[in-house]
Amino acid sequence: MKTPPIVSPQEWDAAREQLLVKEKAMTRARDALAAERRRMPWVAVDKAYVFEGPGGKASLLDLFEGRRQLIIYRAFFEPGVFGWPEHGCRGCSLGADQVGNLAHLNARDTTLAYASRAPQADIERIKARMGWAMPWYSITDGFDADFGVDEWHGHNAFVRDGERIFRSYFINGRGDEAMGTTWSYLDMTALGRQETWEDSPEGYPQSRPYKWWNWNDSYVADAAPDPTWVKVSDAGEATFRKPEQGALTPRRNGE
């Protein structure tokens, strides 16, 4: 193994600052891509799909759980998949292990659900065994084929207007590697993170960054931000500002 050179702390800091320039450029490029996703056209979903859930049959609209956005990950856990019946696909299972606490995603009016062709009894069994908590439904019709996930995994994002449902985006292949955090999920949705710094079309819901954050057991729908937390987060945000041409410019998302 040929290791990198061993340098002084000062040289290490200089090397890190040099690489940081590229990392910041990548962050800004990622934000710009997410802004383009928010401007992608939508396609109406007019077909009535039927899933099987813990409570019985469920429509695609039911999977939203009353929220405005829905992300469905097609996980391969079913007869014929390596690992069946004790396990699901190793890749899909690795992805399931990355899923963060869904309370934060739900607080942005977004639901994440998994879907497979396994019966519900098997899904509930593997969820309990592996410690997974996401809603997980059984596919009963051509949903997977219609949305490009009959032969390979992928995330489909949907948005609704009342009872009308639209497909807004699709991520699969190596794109799935980045999924699992609140941010990666929101960045693929039609509405994004819904924060004021984002470049979003006029009229999109937005609130100040940091203010809506909460402990995963403390979210209250439509509650105003805690005033003490507003002060704390304002002070924290101020530490991520830098002098630039005589002004203070916010540094967001690692910028």
Image (cartoon, rainbow, N blue to C red):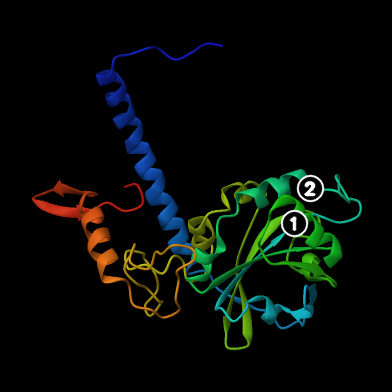
Q: Nearer the viewer, residue 219 or 16?
A: 219
Question: Compared with residue 107, is residue 10 higher up or lower down, i.e. above or below?
Answer: above
Between 250 and 172, which is closer to the camera in this rendering? 250
Name the residue carrying label 2. 89
- Disc 1/disc 2 C-alpha distance (Å): 16 Å
Q: Earlier in the sequence, mark 1 or mark 2?
A: 2
Whether residue 118 is visible, yes or no, is no
Q: Is 230 situated left or right of 242 in this image?
A: right
Q: How many marks are shown on the rendered structure?
A: 2
- Residue 244 spot, x, y in % from top left: 15, 48
Q: For mark 2, give the secondary structure.
A: loop
Residue farthest along the right direction in this orientation: 80
Toward the left, the furthest residue is 246
Q: Is residue 81 above or below residue 73?
A: above
Badge 1 marks a residue whose secondary structure is helix
The residue type indicated by label 2 comes to Cys
In the rendered structure, the answer to whether residue 173 lies left or right of residue 9 reads right
Q: x, y percentage for residue 232? A: 25, 59
Depth-wise, is mark 1 or mark 2 nearer the camera?
1
Amino acid identity at mark 1: Ala
Q: Residue at x 38, y 40 (%)?
A: 23
The location of residue 16, given as percent across then percent down, is: 33, 29
**Left of 215 or right of it: where is 243?**
left
Return the residue found at the far front. 217
- Which residue bears the numbered disc 1? 128
Q: Give how far across and how far down residue 174 sits, in percent.
A: 63, 46
